[in-house]
Amino acid sequence: MNVVAIIQARMSSTRLPGKVLMPLAGRAVLAHVVERVRHARRVNAVVVATSTDASDDAIQAWCEAAGVACWRGSLNDVLDRYHQAAQAHQADAIVRITADCPALDPAIVDEVVDAFITGGYDFCGLAGEFPDGLDCTVFAAKAIARAHREARLPSEREHVGPYIEQHPEWFKNGAVRKFTGLAHHRWTLDEPRDYEFLQAVFSRLYRDGAPPFGAADVLALLAREPALMSLNADITRNAGYLKSLQADKQQDHVQP
């Protein structure tokens, strides 16, 4: 099975433009994400999927300089971008990663891929009460292809997984429930205060050339320094997806 990790990245974030190439511990945020995914043993290839918008020329340039495969597609139809990138790289399974998760844990990626393969699923993701920023989902390429043909709502095109997740009658869905009581943790990069939090974490845990620190290391740090969590504790989780759901309602309203 050819397992390809596709990291979606764009420069035009509305809440924190250019966030994926912002410096973090001496490297671009995207560099940390790529490095962490490459440490996952179950991933055969890593591809950065960005858009054809001129604002994302910088991401392609970074990929070329770093020796990272890059695919460019639709800015807003991320499902199409994934489908095209998966086809180009002959993927059997696709690990969906977002470029705003520089604290991603490679060991968790491996756990989710293993569960996907063992369960014979069309979709399997980290689920339950886990820290925002450890997100990892694996899709069968055939499931992405069907979703690409059939999905119509803005939320289904912009966020890749909803069409598959919401149709268990057609797709065999699995879940890895590894954490409980940790949904209030926020380790993703979407707001300036998230950047402050991640800078604090990386200044304490990241060492150039050393294996990536994991989720357990971050939790231990926050147990020692709980005040760090106050830096970004009150930010709404999954704000982008909630915005897409509002777009769904507007589309339903204008349809005859």
Image (cartoon, grey):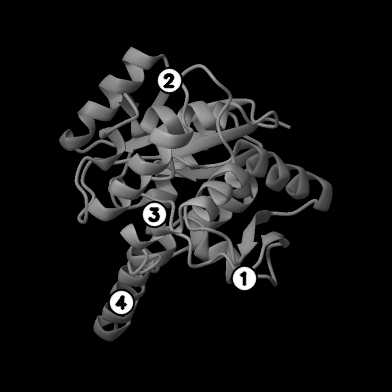
Mark 2 or 3, nearer chain start: 2
Q: Which residue was labeled with disc 1?
A: 167
Residue depth check, mark 4 versus mark 3: number of the one nearer the observer: 3
Asked whether the residues under the numbered discs 2 and 4 touch, taking CB atoms below 8 Å apart as contact, a structural biologist would say no
191 and 238: which one is in front? 191
Q: Is residue 176 above or below residue 18?
A: below
C-alpha distance separating marks 2 and 4: 35 Å
Circles 4 and 3 in contact, beta carbons < 8 Å: no
Q: Quadrant of residue 166?
A: bottom right
Q: CA distance from mark 1 to mark 4?
A: 20 Å
> Which residue is at the far front?
224
Q: Which mark is residue 68?
A: 2
Residue for badge 4: 246
Side of 256 where 208 appears, left or right? right
Question: Which is more N-terminal, label 4 or label 1?
Answer: 1
Secondary element type, mark 3: helix
